[in-house]
């Protein structure tokens, strides 16, 4: 289908850039985990602070990205007016809240458990405020189908972040340089400089988006603003609940750990480092989302839209399940991305990856309440998931530590996914190819069990060989079932 080809093209660009960007960003993990030992707890602080950051970015964008796409595609809308209104709304909230946080940084830091480090709060909040503001120009680039510029800016920003981390952790110490006393008298690495680097990179992004930010001159429409807020608030609740499903564990973990604060941060650092490996699913889901969200809204009037949605779901699962198998097949190589002192937490990787697959399915299902303007349902589903996550965490963290966090996410996403599917079928029925999807899931489970046995029972070279063959089984089945070679360009003529 031409429409699926268009989606595939944009997804490929977003996907490749997302994979490249994530791969580059992964370099932060070995850089930081090799300099911050797991026992020190510094990486636990980074994990904890970034969990708050993920929540704040949802609050400061308050559903305006999805709302922007919806109103840009409404009949009779003025795109320039829509863009300018959204920019001003998000910018005003970011500026106002930043002033409040700077003024009250000390009590906020004390409440978060960082009483002696209020600079953590100030630096990271300013970073989030900037990122929330420029999220709208990035959404605008997606809306006008400029994935190359979108991808280039994202990759350049992450590359700069990596470079500055290398300068701080390796180059300056190697040259015995201590500008401005950033290492203190003992040349000790300070977590706050990780946050300062992020702030600097976000500020550079503002400069690179100056052309898109000129759209703020389009004026402000009060009536449009009210309509947008009415549409957006359930998305905000849904997004907040959904992000809590991803980050709540890292936020509450130190409070329910049961050990000393140092032990809690050490365990949280191990969990935070290992779930970085599982974030391959976030890459795929995010890449698909960047292309899929504007695509869905633009397809709303087409007759074959439901068929396209059903096929998109199947292909999304095909590739995410294959990614799951590839990561697990080569986990002994992938684990080199993190410091050796963090390897004890690798058992969370398959659980977290499976949870992220379910989150991707949940996102794919979400279009039914967005297209029918029943966004409140998304808030309900995500809210239920957040409650499940919270309960599982507080009950089991004291006994099972970070393993409870992994299973809590699995349970939360599973509940949200199933609720969205069964209720969505009542309001906006789509005939998904459930039998085909079930066959792929069953095959993946069988192959995963075999990969797990191989990795545990065979020497490294033997397990890699066997696991490669097992991944090959999945690829052969996929080609046979959904991607016959005869339909491929160029080489297809040799199989007809």
Image: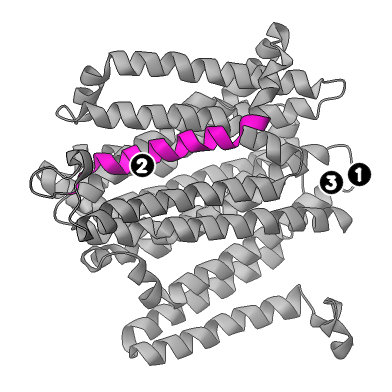
Q: CA distance from mark 1 to mark 3?
A: 6 Å
Q: State how many labels appear.
A: 3
Residue 197 - label: 2
Camera sees residue 386: no
Label 1 environment density (alpha carbons within 10 Å; few <14, some 14–19, many ≥20): few
Q: Classify 10 Å Cα crowding around label 2: few (below 14), some (14-19), many (20 and above).
A: some
- Give me the C-alpha separation between circle 3 and circle 2: 44 Å
Secondary structure, mark 3, is helix
- The percent coordinates of residue 197 (x first, y second) are 36, 42
Q: Classify mark 1: helix, strand or loop.
A: loop
Label 1 close to label 3 by CB (< 8 Å): yes
> Disc 3 marks which residue?
305
- Please state the horizontal and vertical placement of residue 471, each as a whole percent of the image: 55, 80
| Nearer to us in this view, 468 or 419 | 468
The spot of residue 15 in percent (x, y) is 63, 57
The residue drawn where x is 73% and y is 21% is: 82
Which quarter of the rendering shows the C terminus? Answer: bottom right
Residue that label 1 marks: 303
């Amino acid at each position: 289908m031409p429409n699926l080809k268009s989606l595939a093209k944009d997804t490929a660009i977003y996907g490749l850039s997302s994979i490249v960007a994530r791969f580059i960003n992964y370099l932060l993990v070995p850089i930081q985990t090799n300099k911050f030992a797991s026992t020190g707890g510094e990486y636990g602080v980074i994990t904890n602070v970034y969990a708050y950051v993920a929540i704040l970015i949802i609050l400061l964008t308050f559903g305006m990205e999805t709302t922007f796409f919806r109103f840009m595609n409404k009949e009779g809308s003025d795109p320039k007016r829509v863009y300018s209104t959204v920019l001003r709304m998000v910018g005003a909230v970011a500026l106002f809240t930043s002033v409040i946080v700077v003024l009250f940084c000390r009590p906020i830091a004390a409440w978060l458990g960082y009483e002696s480090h209020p600079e953590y709060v100030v630096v990271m909040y300013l970073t989030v405020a900037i990122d929330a503001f420029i999220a709208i120009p990035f959404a605008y680039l997606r809306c006008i189908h400029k994935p190359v510029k979108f991808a280039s800016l994202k990759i350049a920003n992450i590359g700069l972040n990596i470079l500055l981390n290398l300068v701080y952790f390796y180059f300056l110490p190697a040259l015995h340089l201590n500008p401005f006393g950033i290492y203190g008298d003992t040349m000790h690495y300070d977590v706050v400089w990780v946050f300062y680097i992020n702030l600097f990179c976000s500020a550079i992004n503002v400069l690179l988006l100056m052309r898109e930010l000129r759209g703020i001159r389009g004026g402000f429409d009060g009536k449009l603003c009210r309509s947008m807020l009415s549409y957006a608030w359930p998305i905000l609740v849904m997004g907040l609940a959904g992000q809590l499903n991803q980050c709540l564990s890292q936020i509450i973990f130190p409070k329910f750990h049961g050990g000393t604060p140092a032990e809690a941060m050490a365990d949280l650092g191990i969990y935070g480092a290992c779930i970085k490996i599982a974030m391959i699913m976030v890459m795929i889901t995010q890449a698909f989302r960047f292309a899929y969200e504007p695509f869905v809204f633009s397809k709303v009037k087409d007759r074959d839209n439901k068929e396209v949605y059903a096929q998109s779901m199947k292909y999304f699962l095909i590739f995410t399940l294959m990614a799951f198998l590839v990561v697990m097949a080569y986990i002994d190589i992938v684990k080199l991305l993190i410091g050796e002192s963090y390897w004890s937490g690798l058992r969370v990787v398959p659980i977290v990856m499976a949870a992220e697959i379910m989150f991707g399915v949940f996102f794919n299902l979400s279009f039914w309440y967005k297209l029918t303007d029943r966004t409140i349902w998304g808030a309900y589903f995500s809210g239920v998931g957040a409650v499940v996550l919270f309960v599982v965490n507080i009950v089991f963290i004291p006994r099972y530590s970070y393993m409870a966090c992994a299973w809590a996410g699995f349970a939360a996403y599973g509940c949200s996914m199933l609720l969205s599917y069964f209720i969505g079928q009542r309001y906006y029925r789509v005939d998904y190819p459930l039998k085909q999807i079930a066959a792929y899931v069953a095959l993946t489970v069988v192959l995963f069990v075999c990969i797990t046995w191989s990795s545990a029972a065979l020497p490294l070279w033997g397990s890699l060989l066997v696991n490669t063959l097992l991944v090959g089984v999945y690829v052969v089945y996929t080609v046979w079932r959904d991607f016959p070679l005869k339909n491929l360009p160029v080489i297809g003529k040799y199989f007809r």
